[in-house]
Amino acid sequence: MEILDVNIINHPYQVKIGEGLLKNTGELVAAVWPTRKVALVSDDNVAPLYQEQVAASLSQSGFQVFTYQFKAGEESKSLIVLGELATQMTADGFNRDDGVIALGGGVTGDLAGFLAATYMRGLALIQIPTSLLAQVDSSVGGKTAVDLGTTKNILGSFLQPDLVIIDPNTLQTLEQRDLVEGYGEVVKVAGLTDHDLWQLVETINSPADILEHAEKISELAIKYKAEVVEADEKEGGLRQLLNFGHTIGHAVEALSDGGLRHGEAVAIGMVAISEVFTNHGLTPQSVTDQLTDRLVAVGLPVALPKLDTNKILLKVKNDKKSHAGHLNLIYLKAIGSPEIKSVELTEVANFLNLVS
């Protein structure tokens, strides 16, 4: 088992990574929480696979477990589903001494996390991510949110978990597309970091390779993210680097009407923004080519879909990462050398070449 420390001021916690950890959930949780009432939240894809096993392990360690399910998919990351879950918890008598455990992918982590952050103004939270996207990215760092219409993550809160449990064996039950989409976030982190992750990414040429190296991928990706989050918990500066590929990515994801997964959209967004900065002479063509090659190697899309440029521009301008009339765009001077460029909103269309 690999144990990583996330040293957030006032709320340090650990990420535990290892094959077979799921069956020891109760023991791992009991090491950080006294026995209490637990809301175990999963979607209806993950629940039949793992919820009963995790609930049994928690019960054996003395926790009173209530299991909740919601319909799988981004559309469930909404105020309606949030309200339904909160209503169920109220009926089951949850109070501030209790806790929420998110068992599932990125949608579950965001939704259950925001539920924990807002129910009675905050309950304790533990993340058990079962998808690659959640394991390498969204389960660590404390971001929780729901969508409003087609605007992603616009209502949210920071709530650091008390523990993150990662069992790479859960990736074996993912459909190939669901596995591969999470790899978009892996390539993003690899492009940002000067750690060993890019060297590992250069050896991965298929979904089978992702599975083979899943534990090491999570370890290296989380090490980098932990460093960034420790330095900038609330995204005031350095943490903005983690948005590489997301500004355009979120726009095309929202406009795809469910046709693109998050990691797929991020892959498209990384290549698109890199091409923009290559055209401006700030990202070398070789870097854009390297990113493209590593994404295409596992089957991720990299071409912008045919969408109305005015609609893309509107989404980009309304991105929640805009500040004081400026939009901060992340680009790479080289692999491992990210930079932030602030562009006035009035100039974004010309800068991104989104003028129709």
Image (cartoon, helix red, strand yellow):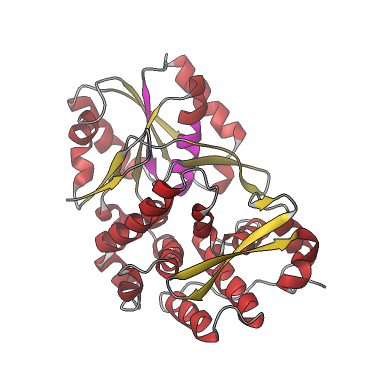
Q: In the rendered image of this protein, does residue 54 appear above or below residue 190?
A: above
Q: How many marks?
A: 0
Q: Residue at x 72, y 49 (%)?
A: 324
**Residue 81: quarter of image:** top right
Please state which of residues 319 and 346 is positioned toward the viewer in this rendering.
Answer: 346
Q: Position of residue 227 (x, y in %)?
A: 37, 53
Q: Residue at x 41, y 17 (%)?
A: 96
Residue pictured at 43% horizontal, 77% vertical: 294
Can residue 4 be seen?
yes
- The structure residue drawn at horizontal position 39% and vertical position 60%, both measured from the top left corner, is 175
Q: Is residue 23 magenta?
A: no
Please identify the quadrant where the C terminus is shown: bottom right
Check residue 107 for magenta coloring.
yes
* Highlighted magenta segment, given as a residue range: 98-115
Residue 266: x %, y % from top left: 54, 64
Against 200, residue 226 (above or below) is above
Residue 318 x %, y %: 72, 52
- Can the viewer see residue 315? no
> Against 315, is 205 above or below?
below
Q: Position of residue 197 (x, y in %)?
A: 33, 68
Occupied quadrant, residue 340: bottom right
Residue that lies at the very extreme toward the bottom in this rendered image: 286
